[in-house]
Amino acid sequence: MPVPRLSATAAPDDVADALAREGCAVVERLVPPGLLDRARAELQPHLEATPLGPDDFTGRRTRRTGGLIARSVTCRDLVTHPLVLGAVGRVLAHVTTFQLHLTQVIAIGPGESAQPIHRDQWAFDFFPFPQGYEVQCNTLWAMTDFTAENGATRLIPGSHRLEDRREFHPEDTEPAEMPAGSVLFYTGALYHGGGANHSSGIRYGLNLTYAVSWLRQEENQYLSVPFEVARGLPEPLLRLMGYARGAYALGYVDDMRDPLAVLRGSTAADTGLGDLAAAEARARRPVD
């Protein structure tokens, strides 16, 4: 089954529909390649300083550079891209809120072998989420062209509907080939893995992922982004990073204070939990 492909004019519903069917979709040429070149230039010192991976999963010829909110102004815009947030909101519409899960440039070097095929949601201690209950919606932006030769991510379209803990091999997959400036969407339940790099160049991909707010973030945004940087960021981005109260009673600080108010040193009386009426309505909703 080929990877679904959409044009840059796709709407969030188009992306969400493709993800419901196949668990993945490529939106081609969503941003100019120069925008991702700018992000790479902002991150270059950090990319060069990042050590190679310590094992076969992270990649012994692969560098994974995080902390992108703090390190790249351009990446902040990509994290909040309207199509991305619109699509993520639809895929994860069954929960009250979602948040940023991780930010990472994945640089697959020449000679890297194929990554083991896996589900990203296994990061949650291999908890067996109910089939069809998505807890993640992920993006991988092509900072360079993605080809089968240079390590394009390998996918099994439709595998988000399969049972958990299946074992697959690269030959069971399809490469998510796409030109620079394109973005791959895929859910946390989709079986996938980084491809082997048989080329002489580095494959750069910008991995920005989102998850339901009641699960722990893979990348700790509160320590990855220094407080002095966080205090100057716009409120929507901060709340996406996790500086927000979630569901009804998650994420408050000490005497039920809003975490965003605490970050900014506000002395205003802003205490309380979430929307009680909405929480009670969800509690009475029948389980599907």
Image: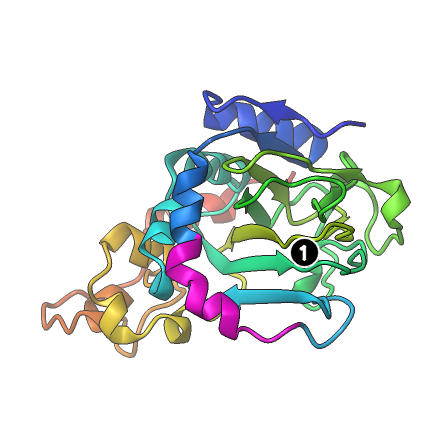
In this picture, which residue range is highlighted in magenta?
40-52
> Along the line of sight, which residue is nearer the eye, 58 or 282?
58
Residue at the image position 17 percent from the left and 65 percent from the top: 270
- Picture coordinates of residue 211 (x, y %)? 53, 53
Q: From this viewpoint, is residue 69 visible?
A: yes
Asked whether 215 or 277 is in front, the reply is 215
Crowd around label 1: few <14 · some 14–19 · many ≥20 (10 Å): many
Position of residue 220 measured from the top left corner of the image (x, y, whole percent): 46, 71
**Residue visible at 63% across and 25% down?**
5
Residue at 87 percent across and 52 percent down: it is 166
* Frontmost residue, 56 versus 156: 56
Res. 258 in view? no
Q: What element carries label 1?
A: helix
Pick out the residue farthest to the left.
268
Q: Mark 1 points at which residue?
A: 120
The image shows residue 232 at horizontal and vertical percentages of 20, 63
Asked whether 98 or 100 is in front, the reply is 100
Q: On the picture, is 31 further left or further right than 17?
A: left
Quarter of the figure with the C terminus: top right
User: Measured along the vertical axis of the image, is residue 288 above or below residue 60?
Assistant: above
The N terminus lies in which quarter of the figure? top right
Mark 1 is on which residue type? Answer: Asp
> Quick check: 136 above or below 181?
below
